[in-house]
Image (spheres, grey):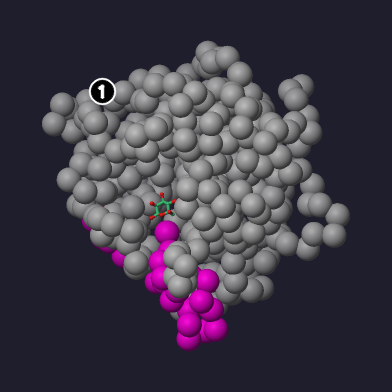
């Protein structure tokens, strides 16, 4: 038995990661690997549907030497533990993606060097910026999607089976786009990806679309999933932009999509988390959508940092049997944090507190 989840605190996140890189077997990254996902019970007195890990941030800004921020990162079960793809910024603040390894999802070894890709030299990113990765397992392949900077931000894609060798594919979309999030299985024989068309700056707008592909290269049938807004139904927290977060989770009630939602204020953007349920066969159809945020910046490490007032989810680990969800999110564009929920409660909450507009 591994470390008891929920009882490991990784301190204030300013410690240096000490876990040594562990060779993990390729092809054994079944969802629900041998390792237990991180977990803590809801604190006494807390009535929220999503609650924070008490040892946040699990990865602080200086977790590896020279790092100024490690955040908005993705993790997935792999082998007998977990693998991750991390947004790491050194003193240049130019973001790159680094792999990482963990036995328990809490203490990570993060590679000091960025991922290098193989593939068509016209495609392979040499020195492009890369940020906000997601990792999705489809059949026996892990796909990494991220915001890549070739000719302006858009969705870059790579695949790997072992988190050692990554083959980069053509970008999925034209610039400008962000938050490319794959579905974990084909739907009607097509790959599906959510994304948020944007501009090349700090986009003051954003709606979620879904696109389909027969081969992970050619993407089309771009359909609107959900708009920003909500003023007409009494909400401001998601009025400026919305973007998909972790890989959607398949449930009997539909695809559970956790997303980030932004409101503009006189002091800048505020990034919160919301949840929605999408139709299983036609995921551009929203069945339910929370009419209030499920997590919003409140903790010190969320309201203070490189960019204050940001919670930005990029991954979730799910243990269906135990009804547990561990959500990884970036805090204040500085550190990586964890929050928890009971899957069934989050689904019920989304259904009971919904406004689809
Ligand atoms: C978004 C992206 C994210 C970032 C967020 C808040 O547009 O750039 O990487 O976390 O803004 O700054």
Residue 245: in sight, yes or no?
Answer: no
Label 1: how many residues lie within 10 Å, few (<14), some (14-19) or many (20+)? some
Would residue 263 appear left or right of 131 to someone viewing this image? Answer: right
Answer whether residue 57 is magenta in the image.
no
Between 27 and 292, the one lying in front of the other is 292
Q: Residue under label 1, please give it.
A: 118
Q: 345 and 214: which one is in front?
A: 345
The image quadrant of residue 14 is top right
Give me the residue at 20% from left, 52% from top.
174
The residue lying at 46 percent from left, 26 percent from top is: 66
Q: Quadrant of residue 244?
A: bottom left
Is residue 342 shown above or below 128? Answer: below
Q: Position of residue 27 (x, y in %)?
A: 48, 22
Residue extending farthest to the bottom is 232
Is 109 on the left or on the right of 96, as rendered? right
Question: Residue farthest to the right?
Answer: 44
Say whether mark 1 is within 8 Å of ligand 1.
no
In the image, what residue occupies the spot 67% across and 36% down? 12
**Residue 306 shows in the view:** yes
What residue appears at the point 64 percent right and 74 percent down from the top-left corner?
Answer: 353
Q: Which residues are magenta?
A: 219-243
């Amino acid at each position: 038995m591994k470390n008891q989840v929920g009882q490991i605190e990784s301190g204030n996140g300013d410690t240096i990661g000490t876990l040594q890189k562990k060779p993990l077997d390729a092809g054994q990254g079944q969802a629900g690997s041998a390792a237990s996902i991180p977990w803590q019970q809801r604190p006494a007195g807390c009535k929220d549907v999503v609650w924070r890990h008490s040892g946040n941030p699990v990865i602080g800004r200086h977790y590896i030497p020279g790092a100024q921020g490690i955040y908005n990162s993705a993790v997935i079960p792999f082998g007998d533990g977990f693998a991750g793809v991390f947004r790491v910024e050194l003193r240049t603040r130019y973001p790159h993606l680094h792999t990482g390894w963990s036995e328990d999802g809490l203490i990570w070894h993060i590679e000091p060097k960025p991922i290098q890709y193989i593939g068509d030299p016209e495609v392979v990113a040499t020195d492009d910026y890369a940020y906000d990765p997601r990792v999705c397992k489809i059949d026996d392949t892990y796909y990494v999607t991220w915001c890549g900077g070739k000719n302006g931000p858009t969705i870059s894609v790579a695949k790997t089976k072992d988190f050692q060798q990554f083959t980069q594919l053509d970008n999925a979309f034209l610039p400008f786009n962000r938050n490319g999030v794959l579905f974990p299985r084909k739907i009607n024989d097509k790959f599906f990806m959510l994304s948020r068309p944007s501009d090349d700056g700090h986009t003051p707008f954003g709606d979620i679309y879904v696109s389909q592909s027969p081969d992970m290269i050619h993407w089309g049938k771009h359909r609107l999933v959900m708009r920003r807004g909500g003023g007409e139904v009494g909400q401001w927290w998601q009025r400026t932009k919305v973007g998909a977060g972790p890989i959607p989770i398949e449930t009997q009630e539909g695809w559970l999509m956790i997303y980030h939602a932004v409101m503009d204020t006189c002091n800048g953007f505020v990034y919160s988390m919301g949840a929605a349920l999408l139709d299983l066969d036609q995921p551009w159809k929203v069945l339910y959508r929370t009419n209030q945020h499920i997590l919003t910046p409140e903790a010190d490490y969320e309201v203070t940092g490189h960019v204050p007032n940001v919670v930005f989810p990029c991954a979730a680990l799910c243990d269906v049997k135990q009804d547990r969800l561990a959500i990884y999110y970036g805090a204040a564009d500085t550190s990586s944090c964890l929050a928890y929920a009971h899957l069934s409660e989050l689904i019920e909450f989304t259904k009971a507190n919904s406004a689809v507009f």
